Image (cartoon, rainbow, N blue to C red):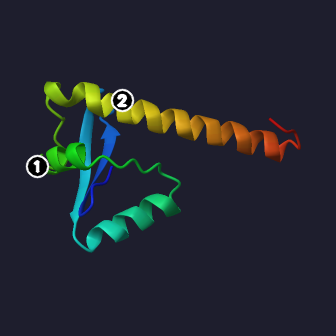
Amino acid sequence: MTGPDKAVALKINDFSGIPEVIARAKGILVEKMIKIAENSNIEIYEDKDLAETLFTLNTNADIPPELYKPVIEVLVYCYNINSELKKKLDLKFLGKRD
């Protein structure tokens, strides 16, 4: 998730099932973080306000309950985008058209 000058990487904690911030970047490191995500086929979602809020959290700490809804909405969006892409790639690999 990015804002103009800040980026935050999220993942679901395997133990708690709660989203957590796993990396943060600002300034010129944002471009590096975005490049890493792109090279790893990780969906990038831009929301300046949410990125600003998440940036204030400690790395590897579960997000607070008041942020569950907006963060889950972002994760669902990214999951759906990745699922659609996977489906299209699978169809292309099989020589089918969607």
Q: Residue at x 89, y 44 (%)?
A: 95
Q: Residue placed at 36% from the left, 70% from the top?
A: 32
- The extreme right residue here reads 95
Residue at 51% from the left image edge and 63% from the top image edge? 39
Which numbered circle lies on residue 73? 2
Residue 80 showing in the rendered view: yes
Residue lying farthest bottom?
Answer: 28
Distance Cα–Cα, label 2 vs label 1: 20 Å
Q: Is residue 76 above or below residue 46?
A: above
The quadrant of the image that shows the C terminus is top right
Residue 14 at x, y = what percent?
Answer: 33, 33
Judging by the rendered image, the residue that carries numbered circle 1 is 56
Q: Secondary structure at mark 1?
A: loop
Task: Please identify the quarter of the rendering in which residue 70 is found.
Answer: top left
Give the residue type that dot 2 points to. Answer: Glu
The amino acid type of the residue labelled 1 equals: Thr
